[in-house]
Image (tube, rainbow, N blue to C red):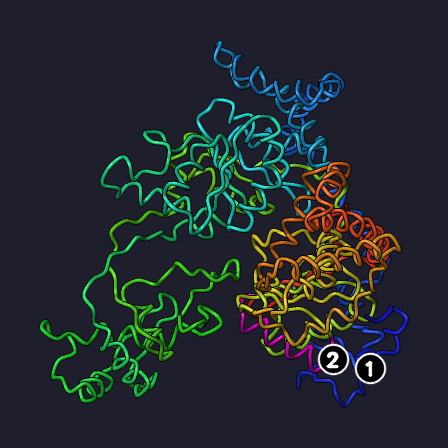
Amino acid sequence: MVTALSLLNAPFLIPKPVTQLKTLPSAKPNSPFFFPSSFPSFPNLQQHRFNGQPPIAASLKEKVGCFKKTLSDFTSLNYWVVRDYYRLVDSVNALEPEIQRLSDEQLAAKTSEFKKRLNQGEAVSDIQAEAFAVVREAAKRKLGMRHFDVQIIGGAVLHDGSIAEMKTGEGKTLVSTLAAYLNALTGDGVHVVTVNDYLAQRDAEWMGRVHRFLGLSVGLIQKGMTAEERRINYQCDITYTNNSELGFDYLRDNLAGNNDQLVMRWPKPFHFAIVDEVDSVLVDEGRNPLLISGEASKDDARYPVAAKVAELLMRGLHYNIELKDNSVELTEEGIALAELALETNDLWDENDPWARFVMNALKAKEFYRRDVQYIVRNGKALIINELTGRVEEKRRWSEGIHQAVEAKEGLKIQADSVVVAQITYQSLFKLYPKLSGMTGTAKTEEKEFLKMFQMPVIEVPTNLPNIRKDLPIQAFATARGKWEYVSQEVEYMFRQGRPVLVGTTSVENSEYLSDLLQERNIPHSVLNARPKYAAREAEIIAQAGRKYAITISTNMAGRGTDIILGGNPKMLAREIIEDSLLSFLTREAPSIEVSDMAISRKVFSKVKVGPSSMALLAKAALMAKFVGKSEGKSWTHEEAKSIILESVEMSQLKPLKELQKLIDEQSEMYPLGPSIAITYLSVLKDCEVHCTKEGSEVKRLGGLHVIGTSLHESRRIDNQVSD
């Protein structure tokens, strides 16, 4: 680790000679494509922020813009809708003193009282304010988080079957507890739908504490679960799942031969759903079909032959492509050459048709690029979701395209398939009598939500004023010019110590930018679909708000880990525990390939652990050593990490006195779990102090700088919403 002071003399911070800088051939001093000759000042970057205007004029223009925005907000329908919701907020706030006086048992008993009142004929709306007040108090006691007034509004928007648009960091996950609890009181089941297994598990464990405390059952659907496990979890009052698992469970139930094979609540499997990242699920991926396939005829041997033929054919001479619809058309020369290579007289012969295989091979060659549309892992071609940057192991392209890609890469060909059941997300979620969603960006798709689902989009105001600055979009003549400029801007921000997050559209682009930053000796982290990066996803994002942190990522939708200025103290504390204890719990090296740029950690200021935490770490390490010896156990690296994770979760669920009591009771048996839990709590306090201090410094520097990139443009966002 190095200190911030020593960084000032680090080799990668020494300005490079002008001769080493790359510029565009036609660059002019006043051009947006001009690259500055000296990094310390970056005059053009600063000048561009005012669009060539003097600071006073830019400031005046900004004030006029703010006034216009305030006026338009006041005259909008959204303003009056939100204002109306404040009547509910006032009712919830008025009930708060009364609810606070209840004991834990009395608070939990409110659930039974609400259910009884509903059975006696009261409507859900009659108990809404009281139910929200109960959930707010339960969250305060179990999570240490009290819903803000604007979060109460967000919960009401969800309950009304609308879409709550809430800015990043405004606490959408906590908001969902309000509507989920209220609608679960009817006993018909509530589905909270996220975009991946990680988020579903996190929310079920984290937010589930509130629901379980209040007496509701919480279920979780995960990949790999048996039918019986799924059946039990779907019977719970509130079930957390991801959109993919939900869709496939519905399709499998429709293919079931008898009632014993059903896993969902039939005859009414759907009641109320809250969809996280609703624009991604219902719009971006809304028309993508979920398919259940059965094996068809096997033509495995034909795909590699067609791939070889495709290599012989030249675009423009033997075939032409249409980018608009990803189609291929063979020319007469191409047909003749293909027939000659395949020793056939007719590519479209009914008895021996080769045309489909050749056309698919050409499509795989032209339109399906490695590290963009797919990635090769463990001998398989896996699809990359272009919206989230994640690998989708269960998905396969249909109509022979996936087999053509496998043949192109020289992989084992998996049997072709026929579709036996399919449904799109839009059709799936239309089956819910009541549907709601939440996201940070839905207003642009409001017309589609209204047309398809009759769901209006309500913009929920931020708890504190938004201090983020959206800078102008910049267009570039070439992709090379864009990436050169982005790398310069990253270096400029790095010199200041500001954390930077760069969003890219593909694995290929993220690694290209990584190479440019390595040339400039700028430490950074990469997050994309490759295993060596994806395995450290939560850790990378948790560090993205620290001073000097540079993070390059594919699309961030659904990453699920908060970026906190100064760093995530919980993740830092867990890393310290793992660094101190893993070597004593296991001798096995981690199976994960570690990025060469793991050196980026070295630029972070070291967390100062206090004397009491050091003593607890030493005690836990000694105990871990003796547990391994006395029990003769040799844990794998993953098992050892699981032991630490379970202990960390124990620290969140049990009070300190109870943990100490467990240690006293198990003193003769090496109480490793409770000891690690107490150590974690002590280290966490030190990390919170460190992160708060560093976060204040990062905020003073200007906060997190976000650069979003597309094909030929770069969008820069200065400052996130305030804490």
Q: Please identify the quarter of the rendering in which residue 133 is found.
A: top right
Asked if the magenta segment contains residue 447, the reply would be no
Q: Earlier in the sequence, mark 2 or mark 1?
A: 1
User: Depth check: 660 or 233 in front?
Assistant: 660
Label 1 crowding class (10 Å Cα cut-off): few <14, some 14-19, many 20+? Answer: few
Label 2 crowding class (10 Å Cα cut-off): few <14, some 14-19, many 20+? Answer: few
Q: Picture coordinates of residue 16 (x, y %)? A: 80, 84
- What type is the residue that disc 2 sits on? Asn
Mark 2 and mark 1 residues within 8 Å of each other at the beta carbon: yes
Give the residue number, with chain letter if any, for mark 2: 521
Q: Picture coordinates of residue 475 (x, y %)? A: 62, 68
**Lateral position of residue 55 relative to residue 112, left or right:** right
Asked if the magenta segment contains residue 506, the reply would be yes
Residue 398 appearing in the image = yes
- What type is the residue that disc 1 sits on? Pro
User: Depth check: 182 or 625 in front?
Assistant: 625
Give the residue number, with chain letter if any, for mark 1: 11
Q: Residue at x 13, y 80 (%)?
A: 346
Q: Please identify the quarter of the rendering in which residue 404 is found.
A: bottom left
Q: Secondary structure at mark 1?
A: helix
Q: Residue at x 52, y 45 (%)?
A: 194
Q: Secondary structure at mark 2?
A: loop
Residue 59 appearing in the image = no
From what the image shows, is residue 195 above or below residue 8?
Answer: above
From what the image shows, is residue 119 above or below residue 509?
Answer: above
| Magenta residues, dominant SS class | helix
**Lateral position of residue 713 relative to residue 356, left or right:** right
Magenta residues span 505-522
Q: Picture coordinates of residue 690 (x, y %)? A: 84, 55
